[in-house]
Image: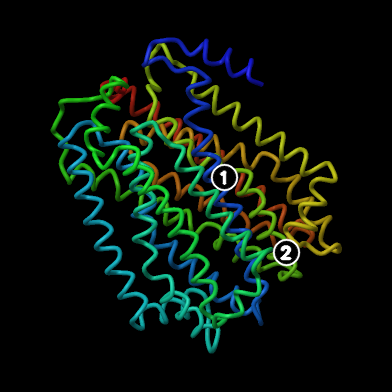
Amino acid sequence: MNEFIKKLKETSGDDLNKITFYKLLVFFIPLGTSTFLISISNMLLNRCLGYIPNSEFYISSFSVARTLMLLFMSPVSIIALVVTTFTQNKNTFKKVTKFALITITLLQIWFFVLSFTDISRNILSSMYNLDGRLLDNAVLSLKTICILPIFFFARNFFLGISIKLRNIKFATIGSFLRVLLILIFSFIMPSVLRAFRAEYVPGILLFGMIFLESLVYVLGVLITTKGKVLLHLLNSMRTQNILSIDDSLNYKKILYFSLPLILSYSMGQLLPSFSQSALALGENKEIILTVYSISLSLLNIIGSFSFQIPQLVVNHDTFNPINKNKVRNFCFFVAGTMTVFMLLLSFTVIGDFSLANIMKVSQNNISIAKLSLIFGILYPASTVFMAYKRGKLIKIQKTTLLVFERVIGTLISLVLFLIVPIVAWQYGSAAGILTLTAANFATGLFTHIVFKISTKRKPEIITYS
């Protein structure tokens, strides 16, 4: 193993602008592992909540409240991309920081208004059909986690700084501690959870996970830079040969870049719910919806690495002729690795074990879940393809087109409303997974076409940095 790493380093070369497999691997592994661990921690959170009395009730209401929170969290989700895209020198970093602070201030005010007025009650009852105690507890859950946007913001803002510093180890450390915390309460100290009122436990656990993770990012950056973040950023960009004297950046440009990303991320949060609505039209909908949710969760855990693909594209000299196709080939490697895992899950006992013992699928529904995995073999690869093409559009700052990309994905998912009533109910979940896979490939293809058209019309928008 050491010899393999040594050979990779030897082929990295001395040219700072030259992309090598080793450089991409060193950049991507901490980010990809971080997203993977976050997915694992979210799965373990539900397992942990199973120890509280009447767990199904509290998990259901908390899940809805969390879904509503994520729907409005898109401004925070894109902060890391804003930092890495626009931080080019001292002045641009200050403008990006001010924009980020204004964004989180407005968002946090909105969350307070949402949580402590009847707005949340009206949204939860109309959008998610909640009523009675379930509605009351969902509103209470939202109040419990209403301050979380600040910590999500801290994590993503300092993640962006870490990427610019090329010091990304905090991503893995923070996410690992997040998983460790939930493991402690799941297997070592489950009895501690009973010391709290059951309705507050989900919010307390999620708050603890995010707080610990964000703390690692903030302290990691401040300690390694000895509090001189800007100085180290400038030195890092100078070393990478990406320090620019261009001060033409303004808040309007950042806003035009951010708003389509925000809308795109929000639409992405709605897509699984949209598919579930279609699947609810078929027979045995309780079984199909459960299997679909579990199968999609497992697929998203495997495909979680793709979430960081846009950062890989944005932060490397992707368009330089010297580096042509190297990022693309690395993405092929990531997609191929994911597909191998999918084949193992779909056609070996590893899949049966994962579904039965980790995802807690009943023996009666294992075959249906395995069928969903077989139909979803290419789902993780489709997320990589879509993310890679999306990253190229983000790099040339044509983010408006990403909204149309989401619209196409949503329209393709409409096919489910036509398919579900006519296929055998056992294939409902598999049809849902296959439709999402097709939507990913179609949106990636759309992004590829509009990228080609955009760069052909305006070749100058391609920058070698």
Q: Which mark is residue 166?
A: none
Residue 414 falls left or right of residue 341: left
Q: Is residue 387 above or below residue 407?
A: above
Q: Of 419 and 359, which appears nearest the observer?
A: 359
Contact, mark 2 vs mark 1 (Cβ under 8 Å): no
Q: Which mark is residue 288?
A: 2
Quadrant of res 337: top right
Residue 3 falls left or right of residue 448: right
In whole angstroms, how far apart are the C-alphas of marks 2 and 1?
Answer: 23 Å
As helix, strand or loop, the secondary structure at mark 2 comes to helix
Q: Is residue 21 above or below residue 374?
A: above
Q: Amino acid at mark 1?
A: Ser
State the quadrant of the C terminus.
top left
As helix, strand or loop, the secondary structure at mark 1 comes to helix
Q: Amino acid at mark 2?
A: Ile
Locate residue 96, reporting x and y percent: 22, 44
Q: Earlier in the sequence, mark 2 or mark 1?
A: 2
Locate residue 80, reporting x and y percent: 36, 44
Q: Residue at x 41, y 14 (%)?
A: 18
Label count reads: 2
Locate residue 171, reporting x and y percent: 46, 43
Crowding near the residue tagged with mark 1, few <14, some 14–19, many ≥20 C-alpha atoms within 10 Å = many
- The residue where tag 1 is placed is 304
Locate residue 246, reporting x and y percent: 15, 28
Residue 278 falls left or right of residue 270: right
Quadrant of res 161: top left
